[in-house]
Each structure stands twice: as structure tokens, then as C-alpha cells.
Amino acid sequence: MSCKLLWGKGFTFVNPINFCIFMEKIYADTSVIGGCFDTEFKEYSLGLFEEFKSGNFKLIRSDLVLMELAPARPEIRNKLNEIPPGNIISANVNAKTIELALTYIEYGALTNKSYHDALHIATATLNNVDVLASWNFKHIVNFDKIKMYNAINLRLGHKPIEIMTPRLILNINDL
């Protein structure tokens, strides 16, 4: 039996010792939205969008994602319009976000070429999301890099950040 059944909406079973994490606020980076139109990632990106639409999860949508979507095809740009406004929380890049992103770069977790990826991680961290969802395996959903982001976050007094693919989020939720 999962924690979701034992404890109510939003709890997800993550190990056999009955440890639960609370997943309600999910920051979806641009790759998750584009994934809705990609053969390899479509099933799980669309599944996560269904969770956002139903209100099981709140989408944390950043102004950075909107900026990155601006040059995309209309169907990709408009995908976010399917989610009811009450299920979306806006997050904006600000001076603190930029400072944290530059700290990730300064400590070598990312390079200047990956500045937007650093901004996504910093935005998610500073908005206290439960999970950052991404299909970016090189810079974001990368075990060694996640350890670095979390070491930096802890050093600066921020909570560690959970980073997962939509597939992992949905599979954990279904246990």
C-alpha cells in the first residue's frame, strides 16, 4: 500500500520503510513541455500534464520557461494554456536567482554555456519546489551534478532539491 493511500493527496511512497515525500509543487523546465511533442518523451510529459490539469500537482511556471518557449512552434508555446490557471504558480527570475545560478557556475557545477540551466535550478530551489522535472540529462537530471547543486544549496542554507524525470515522478506516484 502506498503512502498516497495511507496519508492522503500528495504523498508518494518512495521506499519500503514507509518513508514518504510530499510532492505537490513541481517546476517543469522547458524540456518537459517540448517533451509533449517528442516521440521518446511524449508519454510521460503528457502524463505529467494530466496531473497538472487535474490539480494533483501544481505547476511552477517560470518566466524563464515562457521566454525559452517564445520561439517554439505554436502548439508547444500553447501547451501551458491547457492547465487551469488555479493549478499554476508563477515564479520569476530575480537578483537572488541570478546570484544562485552564478554560484552554481562559480563552483563548477555548470559552465557559462549552461547559464539557463543554472537559472532553472536556482529558480526551483528558491521557490521551494518539491521536485524539478526535466528531460535534460546532461546538465539537470544528472546524479553527479545533483550532488553538486545540493552541496551548494546546503552550504548557502537552502534545502536540497529533488530533480527527476516526468517518468520517475509518475512511476513513484503510481506505487
Image (spheres, grey):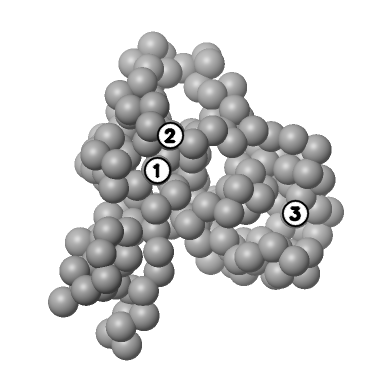
How far apart are labels 1 and 3 at the CA level?
A: 26 Å
Q: Label 1: state its secondary structure.
A: strand
Decide which of 168, 56 is in the foreground and name it.
56
Q: Are marks 1 and 2 in contact (CB under 8 Å)?
A: yes
Location of residue 158 in the rendering, given as x and y in whole percent from the top left corner: 69, 63
Q: CA distance from mark 1 to mark 2?
A: 6 Å
Residue holding disc 2: 88
Judge whether 116 appears above or below 106 on screen: above
Provide the secondary structure element on which disc 3 rests.
helix
Q: Is residue 109 left or right of residue 143?
A: right
Q: Residue at x 27, y 55 (%)?
A: 170
The amino acid marked with disc number 1 is Lys
First of labels 1, 2 by sequence position: 1
| Residue receiving disc 3 | 104
Q: Position of residue 35 (x, y in %)?
A: 35, 35
In the displayed structure image, the side of residue 147 where residue 38 appears, left or right:
left
| Residue in the image at 38% along x and 32% along y | 86
Q: CA distance from mark 2 to mark 3?
A: 27 Å
Query: In this view of the protein, can residue 7 be seen by the observer?
Result: yes
